Amino acid sequence: MAPSSFLNLSDEEDRISTLPDHILLDILERLNDLRAVIKAGTLARRWVHLPRSASRLLLDVADFVPRDSDGRERRAVPRNSMDQVMTAYTTTLMRLVSSSGVQTIKNMQLSFFLRDPYMHSIGHAVGDVVERGKTDHLKLIIWPDTRNPTYEQSVLFGERFMVFFRSCPTTFRWLTSLDLKDITFGGSDVSTLLNTCSKLEFLSLTYCDSAFDLVTGEDTVLTINAPHSALLSLEMTSSLCCAASHQQRPFMLSHCLFNTSTLSVVYLNFQQQLIWVEPEGPKHLSLIFSNLRDVYLYNIFYKCDLNWTIFILEAAPSLNNFYLKVHY
């Protein structure tokens, strides 16, 4: 049954409300539509306590973005609507988690904009929930509050995020998954993040990089050095994307993945360009690839010899799947 028709039943027709609480909760959690869940608690007295009793909380800021005149979701929030969106989002979160009757939330996934002062209210509210010690999964998806930001804006986002990180230690201590976009980090920011977030298993960085060297003015490499972190998966999208030139020397994977021993999946997209990794002997990669299970090599230019891929096979004794895609 669609959420809209589900919530429009009259009192006489609303036989679902006679079901036990645990079944009603299961129905609400399966809707995957926050607006329907909130509406249920608003319109029906029988349902009013249920949203605060759910063990899973998925709150997406996209649900609060004003829709176009034709009802379609907008991809970007108008600047004059950003505060309105975040106010509604924060108010809803407080309503769901601040009640004295709220039950244990085992799985919490929040998506919101990196914007003051709302993110601090969100962080402290989440901290109050997770410090009970019953939350198994906590995922934060944090969006910049500006579309296609400049370098200077991305630096500001990085500084803003680190202030948020330091001001909400309880939340980040329980964090298991983090998705960041359009952030320029300071020198050791990412390593500090990983070494502090002792439960963080998944980190996704989209269009993230490292700030220029203030002395030389040159680009710096985004370095991640956290050998004792709990990280199981690191996903970087377009953060290191650039065209390979004929003058550019290939780099060694052992240099890029130094100090890594838990790597299980590798994706390399060559974008029909030159092969920008340098083959190297198994002794340099055997420790790094000791747990490697899956390798994906995409968009290799069709004129490139494939013999160079052998070095990966030789260095990965536990490899199960090896995928090659040649682009013609």
Image (cartoon, rainbow, N blue to C red):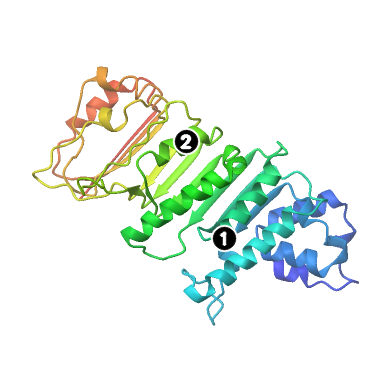
Judging depth in this view, the residue of 12 and 103 nearest the camera is 103
- Viewed as shown, does residue 316 lie left or right of 36? left
Quadrant for residue 71, please give it: bottom right
| Rendered location of residue 17, percent (x, y) | 87, 61
Residue 194 vs 219, above or below: the answer is above
Q: Amino acid at mark 2?
A: Leu
Regarding residue 140, the answer to whether it shows in the image is yes
Mark 1 or 2, which is nearer the eye? 1
Separation of marks 1 and 2 at Cα, in angstroms: 24 Å
Q: Name which of mark 1 and mark 2 comes first in the sequence.
A: 1
Where is mark 1, residue-wise?
117
Q: Residue drawn 59% across and 72% down?
A: 84
Q: Residues within 10 Å of mark 2 (few under 14, many from 20)?
A: many
Q: Secondary structure at mark 2?
A: helix
Residue found farthest to the bottom: 69
Quadrant for residue 235, please give it: top left
Judging depth in this view, the residue of 299 and 134 nearest the camera is 134
Regarding residue 1, the answer to whether it shows in the image is no
Q: Amino acid at mark 1?
A: Pro
